Image (cartoon, helix red, strand yellow):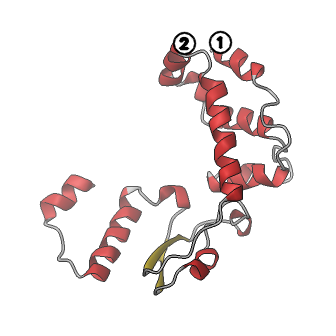
Amino acid sequence: MRYLRAALARIRGVFTGHRADDVRAVLHFLGLHEFAGEDAPVSMDALATLLCDVYDVFNLPVVQALSQRDPDLIARVVALTRRHLAMARRYRPARVDTDVIFFHATRKTALASSEVFHQHPDAWQPWVGGSFHVHDVDCHHQAMLEPAPAMEIARHLRHRLGHARPSPARVDAIT
């Protein structure tokens, strides 16, 4: 564990220059709304420290084992996260001429939609040339593929696509 904390200390400052609202957007995207208030981290460095504490990263056996094999693991994860945030900020979707079913996770705060993560249907509809249908799912974005929301999505797709219900054995295998 000391090794991992030292590795995190070595990479301090890697994220400097990012805006505090990017940090809040990441917190909301991850469903960590309680950390996005007045005392929210204001730098990516502080965010990385908070996330490591919240997820108890340094005590995960897989992280300890991988970090022993790859001393640069933490630095590479930080660099990857930095690139993903930069790509998300620059991304401009192209218009598609197809029908779209948008599964909208309804559990979020008003701050959850940001210029970085476009989780609201209104952000995507202008880019769709075909019909645009919104189906609300009562969960957070990160929970969309958990069993209950995934089953709801599957039922809706099955209905929209006109397929028969799966056999009970297949449903039991999924849940």
- Name the element at disc 2: helix
- Name the element at disc 1: helix
Residue drawn at the location 20% of the way across and 77% of the way down: 163
Q: Earlier in the sequence, mark 1 or mark 2?
A: 1
Q: Is residue 66 left or right of residue 55?
A: left
Q: Which mark is residue 68?
A: 2
Place residue 157 in its image quadrant.
bottom left
Residue drawn at the location 71% of the way across and 56% of the way down: 89
Residue drawn at the location 54% of the way across and 61% of the way down: 141
Place residue 45 in its image quadrant.
top right
3D distance between C-alphas at marks 1 and 2: 8 Å
From the top left corner, tell me how far across and down residue 97 is, in percent. Answer: 47, 81
Residue drawn at the location 17% of the way across and 59% of the way down: 170
Give the labeled residue for mark 1: 3
Q: Is residue 70 above or below residue 150?
A: above
* Residue 136 visible to an observer of this rendering: yes
In the rendered structure, which amino acid carries the disc numbered 2?
Gln
The answer to whether mark 1 and mark 2 are in CB contact below 8 A is yes
In the rendered structure, which amino acid carries the disc numbered 1?
Tyr
